[in-house]
Image (cartoon, rainbow, N blue to C red):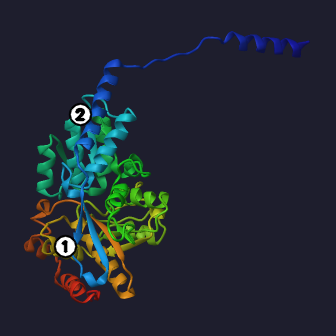
Amino acid sequence: MSTTGTTATTASNTAAVTTTVDVDRSDADYRAWLKEAVRKVQADANRSADTHLLRFPLPEAWGIDLYLKDESTHPTGSLKHRLARSLFLYALCNGWIRPGRPVIEASSGSTAVSEAYFAKLIGVPFIAVMPRTTSPEKCRLIEFHGGECHFVDDSMKMYEESADLAARTGGHYMDQFTYAERATDWRGNNNIAESMYQQLRLERYPEPAWIVATAGTGGTSATIARYVHYMQHDTRICVPDPENSCFFDGWTHHDPHASSDCGSRIEGIGRPRMEPSFVPGAIDRMMKVPDAASVAACRALEQAIGRKAGGSTGTGLWSALKIVSEMVAEGRKGSVVTLLCDPGDRYLDKYYSDEWLAAQGLDIDPYAKTIRTLLETGEWREPQG
């Protein structure tokens, strides 16, 4: 009887809970603002033509084509324009960006320039948390687009300071180093990899043997690699890494905790920690490129096509030329694609300044000779220390 009574009481209590708990946070004003913000960001992409695929001149007898995807022609002048657009759409559609509240980013420069542009486009404040050593020209561009520069002395403190600043202001920390690899649709939808293959359709080698992509967040290399795998291409992916960056060591030793105790001299790429958006398993090859080689390649690019580019472009071009030399030595024909990430006029006081090179203790002559020898003879002679 006692058991039956207990059961009846429990059933009765359960039956009594009949009220639906309903919390509706719909906000018509916010949804109208959000709809307009997304429209503005998407309209920016619709107004922009695709970026050019430039040819780097190589001897015709080699049967090898080397291309640079010229991302410097975006409205904000760099590869990071694509990333910033994707990050803003991702954050807006997740409900993270709100009217009147600042967007905050940890950035060494180009991403901050592009994010400042999109923040101004949708009418929200923007604050870039950046190393004090960031080039004055990048700081000027951030401020030109309405952003604010917030400096830190230790580059490793950028992440923490950005999160704290977002908490203090009620803003949103964009966190490109976490979300870069997931904000872009790697299956296609106008990403950089899909664009490359569409532009190569009428070339003599439409499927490149290698795509060379440097890594800052790692998002671009992840997008390209995933697209290549998804589309079942045979293209291989190489990621060059500059000095003072941990990506190469982390990748070669399968160490997700690899770190470097100082910042990269090649702005925009190289990191002191293994960033969440860097996807080691997706890429085929890495190279550790001396900073002097990156600068030498920048200057060789100007001599070859009349265009100045930033240091990260030089890092990628050095590696691409090394791959070309291997193809020449093996008698293989085909194409190689790398990136022209941003224009060199942002770095006139660095990579194009002999005084800066001397102050940094960088001798680019041996690396310049390696490039000249390759283009003249087809042989790759690595500089000897």
From the viewer's perspective, is residue 328 above or below residue 139? below
Secondary structure under tag 2 reads: helix
Q: Which residue is mark 1?
A: 295
Q: Residue at x 13, y 75 (%)?
A: 303
Residue 371 in sight here: yes
Amino acid type assigned to the residue bearing label 1 in the image: Val
Q: Which residue is mark 2?
A: 122
Callout 2 crowding tier (Cα within 10 Å): few <14, some 14–19, many ≥20 = some
Secondary structure under tag 1 reads: helix
**Which residue is at the front of the view, 98 or 8?**
98
Amino acid type assigned to the residue bearing label 2 in the image: Ile
Mark 2 vs mark 1, foreground winner is 2
Question: Looking at the picture, how far across and down is residue 216, in whole percent?
Answer: 32, 59
Question: Looking at the picture, how far across and down is residue 171, in whole percent?
Answer: 29, 35
Question: In whole angstroms, how far apart are the C-alphas of marks 2 and 1?
Answer: 37 Å
**Which residue is at the front of the view, 139 or 330?**
330
Q: Quadrant of residue 273?
A: bottom left
Question: Looking at the picture, how far across and down is residue 65, in whole percent?
Answer: 29, 74
Give whichever of discs 2 and 1 has the lower sequence position: 2
Quadrant location, the N terminus:
top right
Label 2 with label 1: CB-CB less than 8 Å: no
Q: Quadrant of residue 339?
A: bottom left
Callout 1 crowding tier (Cα within 10 Å): few <14, some 14–19, many ≥20 = many
Residue 152 in sight here: no
**Which residue is at the front of the view, 74 or 296?**
74
